[in-house]
Amino acid sequence: MSSSEQRKAFPFSEFEPKWQAAWEAKNAFHTPNPGEAGFDASKPKFYVLDMFPYPSGTGLHVGHPEGYTATDIIGRYKRMSGFNVLHPMGWDAFGLPAEQYAIKTGQHPRATSEKNIEGFRGQLKRLGFAYDWDREVNTTDPGYFKWTQWIFLKLYDSYVNDQGKARPVSELEAQGLGRDEIDARRLAYVSEAPVNWCPGLGTVLANEEVVDGKSEVGGFPVERRPMRQWMLRITAFAQRLIDELDGLDWPEGIRLLQRNWIGRSEGAEVKFAMAGRDDTITVFTTRPDTLFGATYMVIAPEHPLVNEITTAEQREAVETYKKQVGSKSDLERTELAKEKTGVFTGAFAINPVNEQKIPIWIADYVMMGYGTGAIMAVPAHDERDWEFATKFHLPIREVVAAAPRLGGEGSAVCEMEPAECFSEEGFAVNSGFLNGLATAEAKKQITAWLQERGLGKGMTNYKLRDWLFSRQRYWGEPFPIVWEGGQHRALPDSELPLVPPDLEDFRPTGTPEPPLSKATDWVRYSETATRELNTMPHWAGSCWYYLRYCDAQNKDRFVSEEAEKYWMGGGKPGGVDLYVGGTEHAVLHLLYARFWHKVLFDLGYVSTPEPFQRLVNQGLILGEVDYYAFTPALGSVAGFVSSEFVTDIEDQAHSLVGVDRRTGEKVLGVALKGKDDDVEKKGEFFYIKDSAIRVEAKSFKMSKSRGNVVNPDDVVKGYGADSLRLYEMFMGPLEQVKPWTAMGVVGQFRFLARVWRLVMEENDDGKWTISTALQDAPANKKVTKELHKTIKKVGEDIEKLSFNTAISQMMECNNAFTQSEVKPAGAIVTFLTVLSPFAPHLAEELYAIIGAKFPHLVKPGFVADQPWPAYDPAALIEDEVEIVFQVNGKLRDRATVPLNATKEEIEKIALSSPRVQEFMEGKPVKKIVVVPGKLVNIVV
RNA sequence: GCCGGAGUGGCGGAAUUGGUAGACGCGCCAGACUUAGGAUCUGGUUGGGAAACUAGUGCAGGUUCGAGUCCUGUCUCCGGUACCA
């Protein structure tokens, strides 16, 4: 390899670290708070926030810099445009993966976290992000989690009043409520309810952390068991969490996701008397209008009434069924959901509208956790009930029809069982006094009817459950709670932070007993009191970190009032101005944080009801496209075995066959990794060149097992941070899912190299020197126009987060410079200023180089500190414009006309065009449409 | 099943209010400079056709002087979610 091959197209590896060090030395991106030196109160604020990373051992992946680069560009741009910009970074370092990694490596989680943070911080700094590192937060730092614990105590010390607002429980004390009554209303409370216990992880999990009956982390099975746990009363905020989404500038999809997760449904509760018993069973239904069609009732197997009502004859069957259901994990319960199961209890309820005796069954398709754990089954109008009734031969009674059936005798009565389930709205039939009513009206009337008789009432239910807030883990915030005489109480603020004890062995105990129980000295709080042993879930720290950034060093308060008011309250409409992160947090972090924020708002600690005004989700970056052999015989992709593991690949009857090197087995369908060259498109399919083997092109999520993970460090090493930043922004719209291409990075690298050569040239010794073509001369008209177009478009595109189009405009501008004989230094300085938010290192370097030769063309300081240039509208105006001539809507000719040409003049030019005349074929003109500056369409 | 999003060259993607479809980049082709080129520069690059021309934004219709963009129907893909009564 010759030396010229090794030499970089531009020396990014020298100047990138140089400028990173220079920014750091000058603390260039420090943002002063109100009251601090250097704070300029005349500027508006802009708070741009990234979802802070969980610092894993594997370091950044290319997904991180995507969102981070976007916010960095905006932050730098806003800064240059005269805003006080808050753009911080920190670490979400508590949590299960950290602890599991620590257990695996035998180190203390604090040590591994510190190391991982070190790694992440270094990687981010090498990408040149303009963070204010003075505001760095770390959720595992006692100086931080002191305030997480403090906020928990605020929740503990609050209840929700009749107006739905969080208020201190001292108000309840003043009303003379007793201890138990107060405890029952706290926003943080202790519950014995069944929880998601995960033996594999040795902890309980929130509903949100359980996916398909398995733990979200690790994929271990999760079972239900009753345990004493801390809960947060998020359900008290369900309606506000729905309503207050409306004012937010969030993607519609995310708002919908939250609404669905909270799952509001309106309906009614109906009380059913039971045959031969005095008590009643209450059901929840969204279709009270179908009450006449309730032909049986189903209650959850865990329902407390099951034992009481079951008859002697049915007891054995019921017990067997309950046992069967109980042994099933949630996973099995959903997997086996294909077939309905259930058992008759032997008991009967009385349908209040028609006094009919209806059988009460138990079945696991009714959940104890939702509504009342009991339903009235209306098989004619509910798919699930229909399925169940059909299987167990229960009566099906039609009470809703698509069209009203009125008038004449027998109009309402048709006891024939319907042929299929009709679950839509319609008109009541076979329903006594409801007959003929549309569903909505029928609902109203039956609800009123029930209410008058004390048999029921209108009711709104939510799917959202209270947030299970305790974990049996070591690596989390300890609860600032002590127990004495079976009762809990808060630690005083003066004892915060409550730091977890040092443990030699911090592994889960394997039982529901938390690992903190091993620290016997620590556990003993006093002669008679012991500490709470659970820790908080890792979501706790991320619920308020955006507030801490506003005043990260504050030792006396979680955030000073002044700083909170300025960064979160200031501006319109307040809160974080832009929050960028992945969709994976749509219902977890983003719901929890909103909940905490509302509590803090009600209590007067923050100045806005919502924390994040504008939310943008960056799309996932997928791995490079792989081609997979397609086997016509099987009619589908034959298997995904990467070619690197396969030998002896051959084509057998249009199927790729090979031998898996690891197992020695024959495999079909061999992946041809990333080789575009070997593939060609014929018709709508791809084939391996010169063969009949069909392949499928597909990108997959990056994963270690698939071996398609791109490491940003490698990209930085090969092409520089600026190339990586630019490429990630150029790939496509920020919010879109898009595959990585190694060659795409090269494209951006070449663009930057061309910018470099605008200013620099190689001398005979192969050294870079400032170009002789670079002169202090005005730019020609074409270049000037392109430059001002670029200033305008890039600014507008940044505001729209349309970074890909901003970059293409800068490429066009650069091409205009390249084509110009003389390189106008002043114009290039302006261009570098516009480029600097995207490629800050290169911009600084060239800015400094030009400044050294032409000091009067630059201002002192970093290019990052320069004001965003203003564009000159006059430079954009053209004297002449090209007009397109169409005949019957088809493009036939074009001509350049003066900008101020009148409609009549343009029409005349168009009609005189020989090409236009040719296509008019001598026919008379029916109509002429003139769009000034664009086109003329002649209709004949 | 339900909800959300998207279908444009070989690929990623552009295209204000309906107004020149394919900007910009990748890849590819040709040329220049070169001992060399996987460096750099210049030109070309939607398909068909020698060309004039013609077809063309998933598919089928519709509105309009004019449709990638609006309307109706339909198909496919991606993401989320699922006994929530």
Image: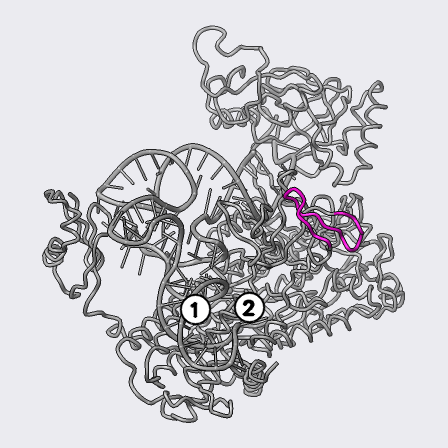
The amino acid pointed to by label 1 is Ile
Q: Nearer the viewer, residue A878 or A814?
A: A814
Q: Nearer the viewer, residue A561 or A200?
A: A200
Under tag 2, what secondary structure? helix
Q: Position of residue A245 (x, y in %)?
A: 50, 52
**Residue positioned 57% across, 68% down in the render:** A65
* A657 in the magenta segment: yes
Q: Position of residue A121 (x, y in %)?
A: 64, 75
The amino acid pointed to by label 2 is Tyr
**Residue positioned 51% across, 61% down in the render:** A608
Chain bearing mark 1: A
Q: Magenta: predominant secondary structure element?
A: strand
Residue A351 higher or lower than A126, as above or below: above
Residue A572 shown left or right of residue A395 in the figure: left
- Bin the neighbour count of mark 2 within 10 Å (Cα to Cα): few under 14, some 14-19, many 20 and up: many
Q: Nearer the viewer, residue A300 or A55?
A: A55
Q: Is residue A626 visible?
A: yes
Under tag 1, what secondary structure? helix
Q: Nearer the viewer, residue A896 or B1?
A: A896
Numbered tag placed on residue A68 in the rendering: 2
Disc nearest the viewer among 1 and 2: 1
Residue A847 higher or lower than A512, as above or below: below
Chain bearing mark 2: A
Disc 1 with disc 2 on a shared chain: yes
Residue A736 shown left or right of residue A593 in the figure: left
- Magenta residues span A648-666
All told, the count of numbered labels is 2
Quarter of the figure that contains the N terminus of chain A: bottom right
Task: Find disc 1 in the rendering and name its residue.
Answer: A807
Quarter of the figure that contains the C terminus of chain A: top left
Q: Position of residue A461 (x, y in %)?
A: 60, 39
